[in-house]
Amino acid sequence: QVQLVESGGDLVQAGGSLRLSCVASGSVPVFNAMAWYRQAPGKQRELVAHITRDGTRNYADSVKGRFTISRNNAKNTVYLQMNSLKPEDTAVYYCNAKFATTILYNYWGQGTQVTVSS
């Protein structure tokens, strides 16, 4: 079993910064990919940032230039550095990790709330 636990969510003013962390515990493989998603009230969950095992990164257009995803495989941790936060970034942020052998294992954290006030 693998558990993902996020932390770092908070209330912050527009223009501020936050750093989210997600730690994997249990029988942890080296994940093929890790990612951050977010879900705002009344909206669908959306991909924010994605990083592969070799460090290739992709971002949603709405966060490019403001957010940075990174990972530490030795610590089974993925981070999301969020700068220049906007009220529209307000959402529950979820950590996701994928590991594939002959089947795809897809893990989710419980989420952490980020609220950006104007």
Image (cartoon, rainbow, N blue to C red):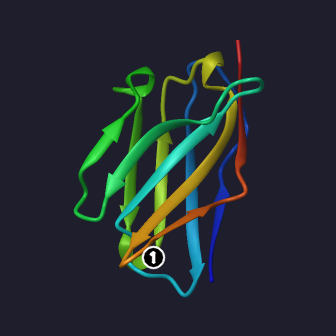
Q: Is residue 8 above or below residue 22?
A: above
Q: Check disc 1: other Cα within 10 Å, few if <14, some if 14-19, many if 20+.
A: few
Q: Quadrant of residue 34?
A: bottom left
Q: How many marks?
A: 1
Image coordinates for residue 80, horizontal then vertical, percent: 48, 47
Q: What residue is shown at x 34% (from left), y 67% (from top)?
A: 32
Q: Quadrant of the N terminus?
A: bottom right
Q: Quadrant of the C terminus?
A: top right
Q: Quadrant of residue 63?
A: top left
Q: Is residue 37 above or below residue 63?
A: below
Please give left or right for residue 77 compared with residue 116 in the image. Answer: left
Q: Disc 1 designates what residue?
A: 75
Q: Is residue 14 above or below residue 83?
A: above
Residue at the extreme bottom of the image, as rendered: 27
Q: What residue is shown at x 42% (from left), y 71% (from top)?
A: 99
Please give left or right for residue 100 compared with residue 107 in the image. Answer: left
Q: Quadrant of residue 104?
A: bottom left
Q: Nearer the viewer, residue 92 or 45?
A: 45
The residue type indicated by label 1 comes to Lys
Image coordinates for residue 33, horizontal then vertical, percent: 37, 60
Label 1 element class = helix
Q: Nearer the viewer, residue 28 or 79?
A: 28
Image coordinates for residue 20, horizontal then vertical, percent: 57, 49
Q: What residue is shown at x 46% (from left), y 74% (from top)?
A: 76
Please give left or right for residue 86 compared with residue 67 in the image. Answer: right
